[in-house]
Image (cartoon, rainbow, N blue to C red):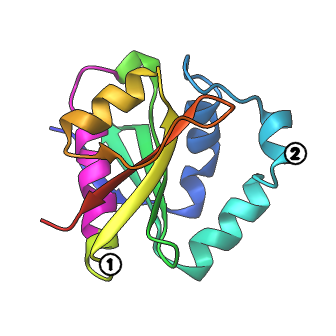
Amino acid sequence: MPLIRPARPDDIPAIFEIRTSVRENHLSRAELAELGITPDSLRAILEASPCLWVAESDGAVAGFSMIDAADACLFAAFVHPRAEGRGLGRLLVAAAEEALFSTHDSAWLETAAASRAAGFYRRLGWAQSGPVSVDGDIRMEKRRP
């Protein structure tokens, strides 16, 4: 049975491994660093606010989700390719939604319009709320149930 729990600083290496292993929306460690996403910045974010959850499967971190609570944004949800199809993504998004909807009536995210992720979010009740951007991304929103 998978376990969803708040992330800890010692989960950061696994989070980076997962983020750099995905097939869609892949970013390398160098590309993440260019965006300001480093182990140190992630550690600081974790210390400032409970905004990141991990999924443990078979004793190892296999996925994570992250929110920007102030902006009501589901910032990230990724599952390691070896752990896809086990329902971890659904559980991670549910943890993020619970936190977001505890303080907001609606939440938003951005993803590529033609991605598997867009279909995944639609199945979870998220809806497109704006046109496709020039880079192919869409904004999706979900209201508190």
Residue name at image x 39 percent, y 50 percent: 129
- x and y percent of residue 138 in the render? 50, 39
Tell me if I can see residue 108 in this picture. Answer: yes
Is 65 located above or below residue 85 in the figure? below
Q: Which residues are magenta?
A: 84-98
Query: Is residue 128 highlighted in magenta?
Result: no
- x and y percent of residue 105 in the render? 27, 76
- x and y percent of residue 48 in the render? 60, 81
From the viewer's perspective, is 112 left or right of 17? left
> Which of the 4 image quarters holds residue 20?
top right
Residue for badge 1? 104
Residue name at image x 64 percent, y 43 percent: 13
Tell me if I can see residue 57 in this picture. Answer: no
Is 49 located above or below residue 4 in the figure? below
Is 105 located above or below residue 28 in the figure? below
Nearer to us of marks 2 and 1 is 1
Residue for badge 2? 34
From the viewer's perspective, is 130 left or right of 23? left
> Which of the 4 image quarters holds residue 62?
top left
Q: Amino acid at mark 2?
A: Glu
Q: In the structure shown, which secondary structural element does the residue marked by tag 1 occupy?
A: loop
Residue name at image x 38 percent, y 31 percent: 118
- x and y percent of residue 128 in the render? 36, 43
From the viewer's perspective, is 133 left or right of 107? right
Q: Amino acid at mark 1?
A: His
